[in-house]
Each structure stands twice: as structure tokens, then as C-alpha cells.
């Protein structure tokens, strides 16, 4: 028994993936990719309580544009559902060689997806960034009032910064514009 709580049989061994912690969020409509975006998770709240330092949703994340993340994300979703409809999220980690590996696929959006959509729409006064609205418009009318890119909906190098019980900041680049969102 380990600390009287678990036995060795309760554990699994898996490959160590020391690279970046990445995420791919995608919206599908009747088997067709409508739009998607990718990000790197940089910092987590309460990282001291986990061996990996990963604890729930990130407190700092950055939008990235990465063709390989897009390809792997789409392949992972299609492996889960050959006719995807709705939001799908993919968790990814980089291996020691930089290869992108899938660690989880879900038929739902990541927790921060609506916050990213709201923040980008508010900062840029661009309703086509509002993921919740896009989702509802597709469900109600089956079409959108604008064209969206299939990949990289949001411009890269934007940071979403948030902490427990405090506001949300959106920052462009390390030295760019700063918006207080909530």
C-alpha cells in the first residue's frame, strides 16, 4: 500500500510527454468542420497539488496557429466520431522529440471555450468570434451570417489570463494591447 490509500495495481505506466500542453477546440455541423482554434496552456492554478502541475483549466493560455495541431486534432475527432456534430475538444502534449500526441478527446468543448469566444468578440467587437453564438445560430438556422475559417478562428499570440475569484484579461503578444474582459 502506498500511504495506505493505493496499491501498485492502481497505477498505470505511460510515456512521459515533457513538451507543451496543447488544446484543440472544434465545432462541427453534420460531419463538416465549421471552425476551430488551438492554444497552448501555460500556467495552472493550484499546480502545487498535482505531480504533473496540471490542475483543471489553465490560468494562462495562448492562442497558437499550428498546422500539425490542426491535423492531429481533426484526425482525433474523426477517430471518435466519423460524422461529428457539435463541439469536440482534443487534449495534446508534445513528446521529447516535439511530436504531438493525443491524450484525450471529448465530444464537448473545453471549459474555457466560451470565455475565449466572449473575450475575443468583446475585445475586437467581432461577433463571429463568439463561439456560443455560432453554436446557437447553427442549431437554430443551420447556417451562419458570415464565413469562418476552418482553422485558426482567433488570431495567434493572444493570452487569456485569469485567476480564481478575479477578472479576466486578454493580452495581445507579450507587449501588446491589454483588455479587461470581466
Image: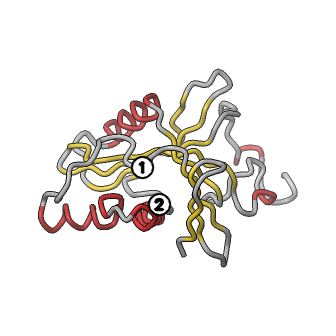
Q: Which residue is mark 2?
A: 116
Q: Residue at x 54, y 39 (%)?
A: 92
Q: Position of residue 37 (x, y in %)?
A: 42, 46
Q: Residue at x 26, y 43 (%)?
A: 33
Q: From the viewer's perspective, is residue 114 above or below residue 90?
A: below
133 vs 158, nearest the viewer: 158
Judge from the rendering whether residue 108 lies leftward or rightward of residue 53; answer left or right: left
Q: Residue at x 47, y 57 (%)?
A: 110
Q: From the viewer's perspective, is residue 115 above or below residue 99?
A: below
Q: Secondary structure at mark 2?
A: helix
Judge from the rendering whether residue 175 lies leftward or rightward of residue 71; answer left or right: right
Pointer 1: residues within 10 angstroms few (<14), some, or many (20+)? Answer: many
Instruction: Please tell me whether mark 1 or mark 2 is closer to you in this view.
Output: 1
The answer to whether mark 1 and mark 2 are in CB contact below 8 A is yes
Question: Is tag 1's residue or tag 2's residue first in the polypeptide sequence?
Answer: 2
* Residue 55 shows in this picture: yes
Q: From the viewer's perspective, is residue 99 above or below residue 90?
A: above
Q: Position of residue 105 (x, y in %)?
A: 44, 46
Residue occupying the far top of the picture: 97
64 vs 164, nearest the viewer: 64
Residue occupying the far right of the picture: 3
Q: Residue at x 63, y 61 (%)?
A: 161
Pointer 2: residues within 10 angstroms few (<14), some, or many (20+)? Answer: many
Q: Which residue is mark 1?
A: 154
Judge from the rendering whether residue 114 lies leftward or rightward of residue 51; answer left or right: left
130 vs 43, nearest the viewer: 130
Q: Measure the C-alpha gap from mark 1 to mark 2.
A: 9 Å
Q: Position of residue 32 (x, y in %)?
A: 21, 43
Which quadrant of the figure contains the C terminus? bottom right
Amino acid at each position: 500500500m502506498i500511504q495506505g490509500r493505493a496499491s501498485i495495481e492502481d497505477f498505470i505506466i505511460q510515456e512521459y510527454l515533457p513538451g507543451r500542453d496543447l488544446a484543440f477546440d472544434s465545432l462541427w455541423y453534420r460531419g463538416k468542420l465549421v471552425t476551430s482554434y488551438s492554444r497552448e496552456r501555460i500556467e495552472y492554478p493550484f499546480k502545487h497539488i498535482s505531480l504533473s502541475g496540471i490542475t483543471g483549466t489553465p490560468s494562462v493560455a495562448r492562442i497558437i496557429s499550428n498546422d500539425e495541431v490542426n491535423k492531429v486534432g481533426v484526425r482525433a475527432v474523426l477517430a471518435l466520431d466519423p460524422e461529428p456534430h457539435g463541439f469536440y475538444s482534443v487534449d495534446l502534449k508534445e513528446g521529447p522529440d516535439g511530436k504531438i500526441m493525443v491524450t484525450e478527446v471529448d465530444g464537448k468543448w473545453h471549459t474555457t471555450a466560451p470565455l475565449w469566444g466572449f473575450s475575443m468578440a468583446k475585445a475586437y467587437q467581432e461577433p463571429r468570434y463568439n463561439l456560443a453564438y455560432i453554436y446557437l445560430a447553427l442549431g437554430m438556422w443551420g447556417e451562419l451570417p458570415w464565413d469562418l475559417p476552418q482553422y485558426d478562428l482567433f488570431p495567434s499570440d493572444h493570452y487569456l489570463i485569469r485567476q480564481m475569484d478575479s477578472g479576466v484579461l486578454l493580452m495581445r503578444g507579450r507587449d501588446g494591447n491589454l483588455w479587461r474582459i470581466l
